[in-house]
Image: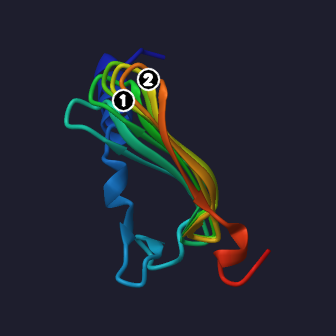
């Protein structure tokens, strides 16, 4: 039996080409806010979108056409820009943001598509500037604002009983 280099080359080429096909062509986001595959079925799996150079741009877990789980958004150099959590296509859980230098600039919490829980904002040098609380989408508790040195400069109170009549 004679070894066929031409067949090996063609097979290798086809495999390489198939691995480099853009993932975004495999699923589409419909007007209804759901992701569908090429057969118009609700998509489930990890969706990956890439920059032109092949570096990962976005990764998101999708279940039955809905974002469900972790979404990662990357800068072109491959470093993490944002981490987002979803539950049944709604913002749910902790969202974090970093600047291009890798410094964390925001942390936010959601529950069922509403702001809910602690929120923190840092400036580009990493100094905390805001410490806030939300309850079911409304401002709640004590909000703190800091100066460029991280020193407390003001507070504001938002009573829980004022939030949707709850205590």
Tell me, yes or no, if residue 94 can be seen here: no
**For the residue carrying disc 1, how many other residues have a C-alpha within 10 Å: few (<14), some (14-19), or many (20+)?**
some
Q: Is residue 21 visible?
A: yes
Residue 65: x %, y % from top left: 54, 71
Residue 154 left/right relative to 54: right
Where's residue 14, x and y in %?
Answer: 33, 36
Q: For the view shown, which residue lies furthest in the right direction?
A: 167
Q: How many marks?
A: 2
Q: Disc 2 and disc 1: Cα gap in Å?
A: 5 Å
Contact flag, marks 2 and 1 (Cβ < 8 Å): yes
| Residue 145 picture location, percent across and down | 46, 40
From the viewer's side, name the closer residue of 103 and 30: 103
Viewer-closest of 132 and 32: 132
Q: Is residue 69 above or below residue 90?
A: above
Q: Quadrant of residue 129?
A: top left
Q: Is residue 160 left or right of residue 58?
A: right
Vertical comparison of 165 with 84: above or below: below
Who is closer to the viewer here, 154 or 98?
154
Residue placed at 37% from the left, 78% from the top? 30
Give the structural element (helix, strand or loop) at label 2.
Answer: loop
Label 2 belongs to which residue? 127
Which residue sits at x=38%, y=60%?
A: 26
| Neighbour tally class for label 2: few under 14, some 14-19, many 20 plus, Cα within 10 Å | some
Element on which disc 1 rests: loop
Residue 12 at what x, y percent from top left?
Answer: 36, 26
Q: Nearer the viewer, residue 154 or 63?
A: 154
Q: Quadrant of the C terminus?
A: bottom right
Q: Residue at x 31, y 59 (%)?
A: 25
Colour theme: rainbow
On residue 123, the disc is: 1
Disc number placed over residue 102 in the picture, else none: none
């Amino acid at each position: 039996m004679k070894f066929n280099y031409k067949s090996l080359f063609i097979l290798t080429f086809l495999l390489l080409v198939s691995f480099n096909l853009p993932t975004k062509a495999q699923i589409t986001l419909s007007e209804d806010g759901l992701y569908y595959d090429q057969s118009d079925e609700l998509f489930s799996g990890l969706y990956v979108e890439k920059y032109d150079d092949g570096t990962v741009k976005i990764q998101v877990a999708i279940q039955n056409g809905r974002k469900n789980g972790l979404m990662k958004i990357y800068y072109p150099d491959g470093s993490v820009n944002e981490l987002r959590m979803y539950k049944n296509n709604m913002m749910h859980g902790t969202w974090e943001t970093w600047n291009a230098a890798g410094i964390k600039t925001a942390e936010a919490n959601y529950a069922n598509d509403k702001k809910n829980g602690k929120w923190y904002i840092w400036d580009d040098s990493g100094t905390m500037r805001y410490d806030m609380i939300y309850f079911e989408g409304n401002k709640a508790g004590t909000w703190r604002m800091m100066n460029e040195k991280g020193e407390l400069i003001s507070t504001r109170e938002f009573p829980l009983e004022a939030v949707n009549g709850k205590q």
